[in-house]
Image (spheres, rainbow, N blue to C red):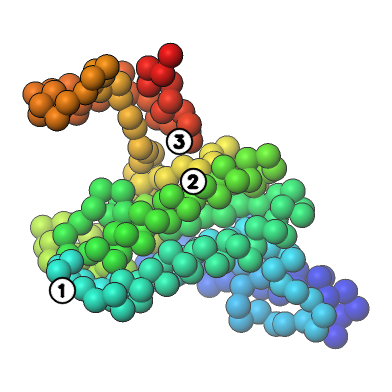
Amino acid sequence: MPEDPEAALEEAALEPVAPSAGSGGSSKPQLPIDLKKTLDQLLGHVPGLPKVPGVQLPQSVTNQVNNAGNAITKPIWKLSTADMRAVLDVHLFGTFWSMRAALPHMRARGYGRIVNTASALGAFGAPHSAPYVAAKAGIIGLTRTAALDNSGVDIRVNAIAPIAYTALAKDFFDHHPTVNVEKLSTATVSPVVLYLAHETCALNGELLSVAAGRVARICMITAPGLYSEHLTSEQVAENLEKIMDPTGYIVPAKSMDQYQLLKLN
């Protein structure tokens, strides 16, 4: 047994990692970062590595990727409370419990990177997917809140909304046979995860859509809309076009930012 338990964990983290199936093993993301160092951080303290007596693994966490998932597909009127809880517990509460365990140690170090797996379904919705949509929407909100809670230290909390052909997504794509899944590989998602987990990551509280080589921001906006000193339901009905018009929109970084659009004085 090595004298330095932390060194033993570092040594374990440097064990070679086999490339994932379908990655080809040849293409590398062209990013100005030390990918090996990032991989070592990502893989350094995951379940399955040798446990060293006297070492509390969470104290060594600098990077965390939350990716557990499941799904129950039914229309909302056929869902039970147990169905909702089964998915919320894995996605939303799993992410919450994991972050809650890691963040005190990241804050003690003054450094950390967290990447949460959300979904475009959580941002835009989807039929027959209420538990999954609600859970992923919750993760988006949880990510933004955690980023704001830790804005005073070098901790970045971001989320991805990946599209990839996986075992969990197979049923979805089976019901959408016109979608060409050839380029929807998980290998096109991992470069974004590596960047968000790296010490040079400049983003915080963001949600990135990631699929087939495309990376783009997904965000919530609000616009000036309709203003009336004595608002009535009739005015709402008569001005839907103005209410729904995104002209002059802003992208709030936090809820209080929307107050700039209110006429309170």
Q: Which mark is residue 78?
A: 1
Query: In front here: 144 or 228?
Result: 228
Q: Closer to the observer: label 1 or label 2?
A: 1
Q: Position of residue 156 (x, y in %)?
A: 59, 46
Q: Which residue is identified by label 2?
A: 144
Earlier in the chain: of badge 1 and badge 3, it is 1
Instruction: Specify the amino acid type for callout 1.
Output: Lys
Q: Is residue 198 visible?
A: no
For the point 25% across and 48% down, which residue is it?
124
Given the current orientation, which residue lies at the most extreme front position? 230
Q: Which residue is identified by label 3?
A: 255
Q: Is residue 56 visible?
A: yes
For the point 72% across and 60% down, which residue is it?
105
Earlier in the chain: of badge 3 and badge 2, it is 2
Q: Confirm or deny contact between disc 1 and disc 3 (CB under 8 A).
A: no
Instruction: Specify the amino acid type for callout 2.
Output: Arg
Instruction: Specify the amino acid type for callout 3.
Output: Ser
Q: Secondary structure at mark 3?
A: helix
Q: Secondary structure at mark 2?
A: helix
Q: Position of residue 155 (x, y in %)?
A: 64, 47
Q: What distance separates the C-alpha of mark 1 from that of mark 3?
A: 34 Å
